[in-house]
């Protein structure tokens, strides 16, 4: 196994494991609008702790699990009705969360659990992570949170079952879009190979993440792609509440659209605006290393990764237009600053 200077220190792995295994009741949670890495991280950690920590409450911040992830081991048993959570856990582990507020509805419901009195383990790979844990298991060079979990288990000699391997590889496949993202490193590929060797179900993962799709997804993509605006260096479209109603799709079915738009001829940043009840959720992708969209999003209270990030905007077309105008200026500046030889 390759190691390098940015590895999580083994002491962190030990400290975090000790906290989790000494807990009587443990909450394992991830962000709202969960993606494959988020759900898979919760499930892998739940399985890893099966023998040591019998009482594990597992949930996503909004109680949702995308339908294409229900093939994962016991995914259907994640808690759906967040209001039924009563008992205070004596330890919490958040996975794939740059900040506890990323839990969304659950954070608002139980914000007193995150005031520092309950020991908190923070396992994440977002460069914008606010290091809020009592133990932070953070590596922003990891391609996914499950990549960190895999290294954690390997380092401590925790047995990785085929079911765990399927979860862990699913997170890597999801966050790297099948090893396409620049976050994919030799270590990512080595760990993926290791997980395949441990019995991860490759065919099922690829099938559920990248092939199967409901017909509502096709209709939603059709509607969103028909509204694409190519305004170099930006390309953008939207998923409105009206489009969701007309196509019968749920919001997460639009998640891949922004990746599809990335790299459109003449453009550098792709954006997808999701209409929410309280404004817009914006998802951004950069096709150029000189443009760090996580930093651009931080100016609006958002964050993420250099090439894939998000933020929120107030409702209305004018807020969106202002954002697009400012973004166009910033991107042009960044491109002018970047090395001309690089393009
Ligand atoms: Mn992730």
Image (cartoon, rainbow, N blue to C red):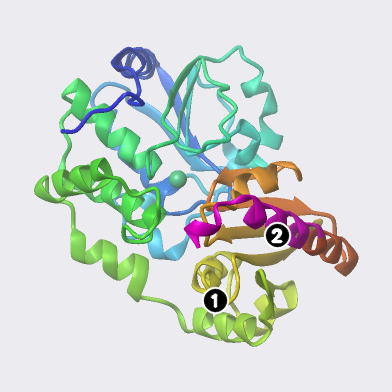
Element at badge 2?
Answer: helix
Q: Which residue is mark 1?
A: 264
Number of numbered discs on residues: 2
Most extreme residue toward the left, as rendered?
197
Choose mark 2 or mark 1, whichever is in front. 2
Left or right of 343? Residue 322 is right
Residue 208 pos. (x, y %): 33, 67
Residue 277 showing in the rendered view: no
Q: Main secondary structure of the magenta part?
A: helix
Residue 151's quadrant in the figure? top left
Residue at 41% of width from left, 77% of height from top?
213
Q: Which residues are magenta?
A: 326-343
Residue 271 pos. (x, y %): 64, 65
In this view of the protein, which residue sits in the foreground, 246 or 257?
A: 257
Left or right of 92? Residue 161 is left
Left or right of 275? Residue 76 is left
In this view of the protein, which residue sits in the foreground, 148 or 3?
A: 3
Element at badge 1?
Answer: loop
Position of residue 249 relative to residue 95, above or below, is below
In the image, ligand 1 is in what quadrant? top left
Q: Residue 332 has which mark? A: 2
Asked if the residue under mark 1 is in contact with the one under mark 2, i.e. CB atoms within 8 Å, the reply is no
Residue 56 pos. (x, y %): 40, 30
Q: Quadrant of the N terminus?
A: top left
- Which numbered disc flags the more N-terminal residue, 2 or 1? 1
Residue at 43% of width from left, 21% of height from top?
25
Q: Badge 2: how crowded within 10 Å, few (<14), some, or many (20+)?
A: some
Q: Badge 1: how crowded within 10 Å, few (<14), some, or many (20+)?
A: some
3D distance between C-alphas at marks 2 and 1: 16 Å
Residue 35 pos. (x, y %): 47, 54
Magenta run includes residue 327: yes
């Amino acid at each position: 196994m390759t190691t390098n200077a940015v590895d999580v220190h083994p002491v962190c792995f030990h400290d975090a494991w000790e906290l989790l295994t000494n807990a009587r009741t443990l909450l394992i949670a991830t962000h709202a609008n969960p993606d494959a890495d988020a759900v898979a991280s919760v499930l892998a950690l739940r399985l890893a702790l099966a023998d040591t920590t019998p009482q594990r409450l597992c949930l996503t911040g909004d109680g949702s699990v995308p339908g294409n992830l229900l093939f994962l081991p016991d995914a259907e048993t994640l808690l759906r009705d967040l209001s039924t959570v009563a008992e205070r856990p004596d330890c919490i582990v958040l996975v794939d969360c740059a900040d506890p507020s990323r839990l969304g509805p659950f954070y608002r419901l139980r914000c007193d659990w995150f005031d520092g009195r309950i020991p908190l383990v923070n396992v994440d790979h977002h460069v914008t992570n606010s290091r809020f844990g009592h133990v932070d298991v953070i590596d922003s060079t990891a391609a996914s949170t499950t990549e960190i979990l895999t290294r954690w288990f390997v380092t401590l000699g925790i047995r990785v079952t085929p079911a765990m391997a399927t979860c862990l590889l699913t997170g890597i496949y999801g966050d790297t879009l099948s090893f396409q993202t620049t976050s994919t490193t030799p270590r990512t590929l080595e760990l993926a190979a290791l997980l395949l060797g441990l019995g991860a179900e490759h065919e099922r993962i690829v099938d559920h993440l990248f092939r199967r799709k409901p017909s509502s997804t096709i209709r939603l993509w059709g509607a969103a792609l028909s509204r694409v605006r190519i305004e170099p260096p930006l390309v953008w479209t939207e998923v409105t509440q009206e489009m969701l109603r007309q196509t019968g799709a749920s919001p997460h079915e639009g998640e891949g659209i922004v990746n599809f738009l990335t790299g459109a001829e003449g453009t550098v940043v792709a954006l997808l605006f999701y209409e929410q009840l309280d404004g817009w959720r914006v998802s951004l992708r950069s096709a150029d290393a000189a443009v760090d969209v996580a930093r651009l999003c931080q100016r609006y209270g958002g964050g993420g990764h250099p090439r894939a990030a998000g933020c929120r905007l107030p409702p209305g077309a004018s807020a969106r237009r202002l954002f697009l105008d400012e973004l166009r200026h910033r991107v042009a500046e960044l491109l002018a600053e970047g090395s001309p030889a690089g393009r």
